Amino acid sequence: MRVLLFSFLFLFSASISAQNLKGNWLLAYIKASPPEMVMGEDGAVLEYNEGGYDDEQSFIEPGLMLLSVLSNSKAESYYADVKEEWKVIQDGKQVRFESLEDTLYGGFNTEGMLVLKSTIDESPTDYFFAAFSPEAAAFDLVNSSWKTNGNSGFFENKTFEFRPKNELFIWENGKHEKREFYIHTLGDFMAIEFSSEILTAGFGIIYVEKHSGTKLSGISFLSLEEGALPVRSLVNFSNL
């Protein structure tokens, strides 16, 4: 009886894990500790911190990648125009994604994010993925203006004017910040990269979730304070 009960609980736990993993995951942000330049007998060399993160040296920046878990054993990822296929291997609460070039491994954190490491990284690096449910296919933004209404301080009461040649005007209180933007195709979906001096990383990513003519919504992870983890923002745009 105990053996049957244990088997049932194990299968139930595994099915829940598989259910939570399947679907689309956006790369919210990356946390890494870069190598330090030190002087050796033969001159300056790069020294990697193998013991973990150095909070004073580590940096955090937005990510740009869509990971689509298609089944319990197969996944695909998209970075700009690069598509990569992965074999999914689950072992209890841990998961591995194996491709011809790389292996990603990790599990869920307490916030429900998928946190992965790469076997080809020489210094400590974590990739934080968040669940994502995109519906909008890629479309053209050039020569259009959108008023923002987000739950992040950065997006409140701003207008994004997408101009030709990747030129972006971010308007607020009658004044504009002249920046750049780029559209990235992620499989059937898209993300908007934009620059801004206000953001600690100098740029941000909006993963487009829905688009219906005059309305546009997406998800962004931004940080306005140096060293602070990016905060999830739900962004809503209205076409002007």
Image (tube, rainbow, N blue to C red):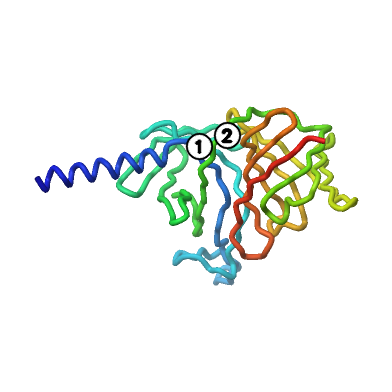
* Element marked by disc 1: strand
Q: Quadrant of the N terminus?
A: top left
Question: Which is closer to the viewer, label 1 or label 2?
Answer: 2
Q: Quadrant of the C terminus?
A: top right
User: Residue 144: x percent and y percent?
Assistant: 82, 34
Quarter of image, res 211: top right
Relative height, residue 193 to residue 151 (above, below): above
In-front residue for pair 28/145: 145
Q: Earlier in the sequence, mark 1 or mark 2?
A: 1
Q: CA distance from mark 1 to mark 2?
A: 8 Å
Which kind of residue does numbered mark 1 sit on? Asn
The numbered disc on residue 169 is none
Residue position marked by numbered label 2 in the rendering: 134
Image label count: 2
User: Residue 132: x percent and y percent?
Assistant: 54, 40
Which kind of residue does numbered mark 2 sit on? Pro
Relative height, residue 31 to residue 79 (above, below): below
The numbered disc on residue 24 is 1
Q: Residue 232 vs residue 76: left or right? A: right
Q: Residue at x 48, y 50 (%)?
A: 113
Residue positioned most to the left: 1
* Element marked by disc 2: loop
In-front residue for pair 111/128: 111
- Asked whether the viewer can see residue 187, the reply is yes
Q: Residue 130 vs residue 207: left or right? A: left
The reply to whether discs 1 and 2 touch (Cβ–Cβ < 8 Å) is yes
Relative height, residue 50 to residue 207 (above, below): below
Decide: few, some or many residues near mark 1? Use Cα within 10 Å; few <14, some 14-19, many ≥20.
Answer: some
User: Residue 131: x percent and y percent?
Assistant: 51, 43
